[in-house]
Image (cartoon, rainbow, N blue to C red):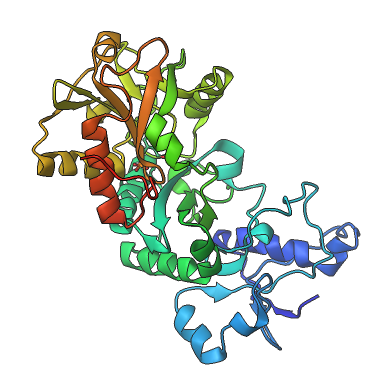
């Protein structure tokens, strides 16, 4: 059991961290219930003596004190539980890559990071998030992702008391701490999750501050192979519609993702990736990707107001302009799908990914199409990551 110093501040901002400490409490760990009137320990964890514990890191890689200062100028190192301590009935899979997470200013091993069960993100999906791809250890378009996070926060009415620049710095630091992970996985996802924080039983506009902020670095769950890019992935139009802005604006990246998750389940049941229509029978997007088609040399994609304005979508629109490919953001129907020469989807960690079918429809030019390949090639030049490996792009 590491020694900890506790600052007994009963602020909502500290409660999520306090929960971690609550679990650390020897009495709780030994199964003893709290006595009437006894309050769990709330405060921030700080190592008091000896080397700070950063488990999962080879001891030679443990930063020295001066290094730690420079790495941790905006985050604090969190003391960790002893290895035999279990705080959750659900075991974290042992094959999960080890890494470090940021939770409200503290750094801790990802598989030990916790937020409170009273967090509104857990209770109600009351939060927003962002995911920036990290190719070979380099974050791609972090600034733009943080801009979009800012828009989602404004939409949700959540005030994050960290500036764009500080969030940029903290994110870069967390990525640096996870360099073992990012150097062994060519594509990682770096996410910021922000929730409104602990439930306070007051009207939402009268809440104290106290958002929860987590920064996580994880390898992409589904590793795509060069063959996936050469043969394309299958898509299916699912019955779940993308939520219209009158229900939940799809332009905000919110953690209330059930709309997209149900679509994803539907797609998986057909052995394909889900493509959602909007409520007017126009193509919208997938649960985690934007959609494009090429017809007669022109690049067409659903209008921005009906979809998440994907960062990759924006990059692709710029790259198409550089290639001299005309672009139109427009309503697309099944007829447009039936008559398309090429289809592809875009997402931060996948880049430009060709689609080989949408139910019974196949792209007229086969897979991968010429415009698609030229875009893959151009995007690889920007990210430094070549999803086709040694297979040459044609364009
Ligand atoms: C609904 C939805 N559409 C599109 C995308 C692709 O956006 P980006 O290119 O920024 O990853 C995502 C990414 O998570 C998404 O969730």
Task: Give me the residue at 57% from left, 69% from top.
Answer: 107
Q: How many marks?
A: 0
Q: Position of residue 49 (x, y in %)?
A: 70, 88
Give the quadrant of the C terminus. top left
Q: Which percent across, then down, holds residue 119? A: 60, 48
Q: Using residue 271 as the reference point, say whether residue 353 is left or right of it.
A: left
Could you tell me residue 149's position as x and y percent? Answer: 36, 49
Image quadrant assignment for residue 2: bottom right
- Left or right of 294 on screen, residue 146: right
Judged left or right of residue 290, residue 238 is right
Q: Where in the figure is residue 305, as x and y percent of width and height?
A: 25, 29
Is 141 situated left or right of 211 in this image?
left
Residue 277 can be seen, yes or no:
yes
Q: Quadrant of the N terminus?
A: bottom right
Of residues 229 and 96, the one nearer the viewer is: 229
Residue in the image at 62% along x and 71% along y: 44
Query: Residue 321, located in which quarter of the rendered image?
Result: top left
Tell which quarter ligand 1 is in.
top left
Looking at this view, name the residue that lies furthest to the bottom: 66
Front in this rendered view, residue 149 or 261: 261
Q: Residue at x 75, y 80 (%)?
A: 3
């Amino acid at each position: 059991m590491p020694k900890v110093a506790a600052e007994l501040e009963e602020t909502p901002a500290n409660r999520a961290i306090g929960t971690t400490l609550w679990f650390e409490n020897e009495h709780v760990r030994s199964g003893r219930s709290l006595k009437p009137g006894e309050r769990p320990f709330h405060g921030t964890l700080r190592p008091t003596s000896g080397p700070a514990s950063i488990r999962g890191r080879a001891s030679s890689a443990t930063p020295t004190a001066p290094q730690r200062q420079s790495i941790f100028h905006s985050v604090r190192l969190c003391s960790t539980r002893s290895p035999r301590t279990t705080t959750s009935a659900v075991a974290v899979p042992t094959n999960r890559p080890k890494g470090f997470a940021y939770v409200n200013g503290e750094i801790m091993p990802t598989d030990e990071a916790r937020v409170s069960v009273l967090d509104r993100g857990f209770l109600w999906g009351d939060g927003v998030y962002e995911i920036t791809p990290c190719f070979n250890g380099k974050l791609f378009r972090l600034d733009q992702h943080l801009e979009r996070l800012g828009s989602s926060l404004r939409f949700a009415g959540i005030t994050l008391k960290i500036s764009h620049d500080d969030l940029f710095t903290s994110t870069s630091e967390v990525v640096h701490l996870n360099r073992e992970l990012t150097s062994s996985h060519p594509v990682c996802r770096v996410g910021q999750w922000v929730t409104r924080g602990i439930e306070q039983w007051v009207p939402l506009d009268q809440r104290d501050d106290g958002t929860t902020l987590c920064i996580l670095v994880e390898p992409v769950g589904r590793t795509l192979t060069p063959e996936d890019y050469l043969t394309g992935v299958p898509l299916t139009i699912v019955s779940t519609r993308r939520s219209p802005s009158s229900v939940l604006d799809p332009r905000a990246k919110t953690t209330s993702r059930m709309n997209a998750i149900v679509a994803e389940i539907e797609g998986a049941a057909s052995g394909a990736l889900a493509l959602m229509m909007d409520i007017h029978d126009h193509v919208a997007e997938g649960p985690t990707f934007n959609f494009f088609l090429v017809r007669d040399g022109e690049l067409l994609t659903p209008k921005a107001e009906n979809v998440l304005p994907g960062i990759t979508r924006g990059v692709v629109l710029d790259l198409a302009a550089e290639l001299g490919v005309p672009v139109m953001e427009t309503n697309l129907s099944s007829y447009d799908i039936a008559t398309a020469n090429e289809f592809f989807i875009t997402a931060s960690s996948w880049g430009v990914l060709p689609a080989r079918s949408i139910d019974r429809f196949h792209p007229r030019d086969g897979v991968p199409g010429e415009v698609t390949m030229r875009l893959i090639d151009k995007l690889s030049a920007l990210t430094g990551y070549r999803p086709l490996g040694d297979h040459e792009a044609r364009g």
